[in-house]
Amino acid sequence: MSDERTVVHFLRHGEVHNPEGVLYGRLPGYRLSDRGEQQAKVVAEFLAGRDIAHVVASPLQRAQQTALPISDMFQLEVATDERLIEAENMFEGLKVSVGDGALRSPKHWPKLWNPLRPSWGEPYLKIAHRMLGAAHRARQVAAGREAVCVSHQLPIWTLRRFLEGKPMWHDPRRRQCSLASLTSLVFRGEELVRIAYVEPAGGTDPKVTGA
């Protein structure tokens, strides 16, 4: 088996224009804000000295936009992998902030019966498996070099917890996956040997809807 070193960077998209403060999930039409576009450029500059051979993104607009400065930097086409998409969520289009959102309404409470799965959206294990598939595909394409996969906070965080052998259910307020952050998987051949995390554009509050 080859022991070549390959790095697969999972990049969370930049800040989204979301003046209504809703949980946008997979809804179309949610683009990067001006700040988000700048964050994407900061990440491209951060990666400028790396050996990036492959750039792939979720099909959602905000992820595709975040990938563009990197693809331009390295003169690569942005590939699309459906497995990098945001998690399904029954609360799409609603405000879900604690104290003033949809969770205050009793009609939504039956959706919350099982936080371990979770009952209101795509199962954590399904998310982890599709994201791991995307990771290995990117590893194969960029073998011996580096790849960037642009995705979303919950899928990236779920994959990381799965790989670290931790329970995938968690407190969303404690996710270490800021806007435009990089969660990097380092492989020797097919074996994952290290997970690294960095915030080129600075830290952000995981509790802020639309951030």
Image (tube, grey):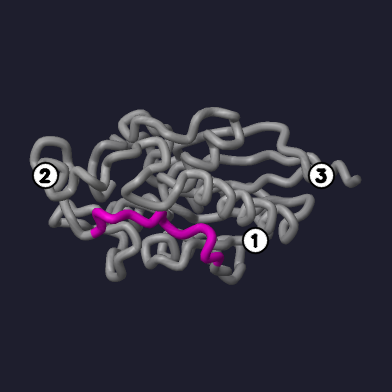
Residue shown at 22%/45% (left/top)? 110
Residue 152 percent location from the top left of the image: 42, 51
Residue shown at 17%/55% (left/top)? 94
Could you tell me what secondary structure mostly forms the magenta stretch?
loop
Among numbered discs 2 and 3, the one appearing first in the sequence: 2
Question: Does the residue at mark 3 contact the one at mark 1 (Cβ under 8 Å)?
Answer: no
How far apart marks 2 and 3 lie (CA) works out to: 51 Å
Q: Nearer the viewer, residue 135 or 145?
A: 135
Residue shown at 66%/57% (left/top)? 138
Disc 2 element: helix
Depth check, mark 3 against mark 1: the one in front is 3
Q: Nearer the viewer, residue 4 or 73?
A: 4
Among numbered discs 3 and 1, the one appearing first in the sequence: 1
In the image, residue 64 sits, relative to residue 18, either above or below, namely: below
Instruction: Answer few, some or many: residues within 10 Å of disc 1's Cα (few below 14, many 20 plus, some between 14 and 19).
Output: many
User: Which amino acid lies under the numbered mark 1 shown in the image of this protein?
Assistant: His
User: Which amino acid lies under the numbered mark 2 shown in the image of this protein?
Assistant: Pro
Residue 176 percent location from the top left of the image: 42, 33
Of the 4 image quadrants, the one containing the N terminus is: top right
Compared across the picture, whether 124 is left or right of 131 comes to left
Q: Nearer the viewer, residue 181 or 128?
A: 128
Depth check, mark 1 against mark 2: the one in front is 2
How far apart marks 1 and 2 lie (CA) works out to: 46 Å
User: Which amino acid lies under the numbered mark 3 shown in the image of this protein?
Assistant: Gly
Magenta-drawn stretch contains 97? no
Q: Which residue is mark 2?
A: 106
Q: Which residue is mark 1?
A: 54
In the image, residue 132 sits, relative to residue 165, either above or below, namely: below
Residue 22 percent location from the top left of the image: 19, 54
Q: Which residue is mark 3?
A: 189
Magenta stretch bounds: 81-92
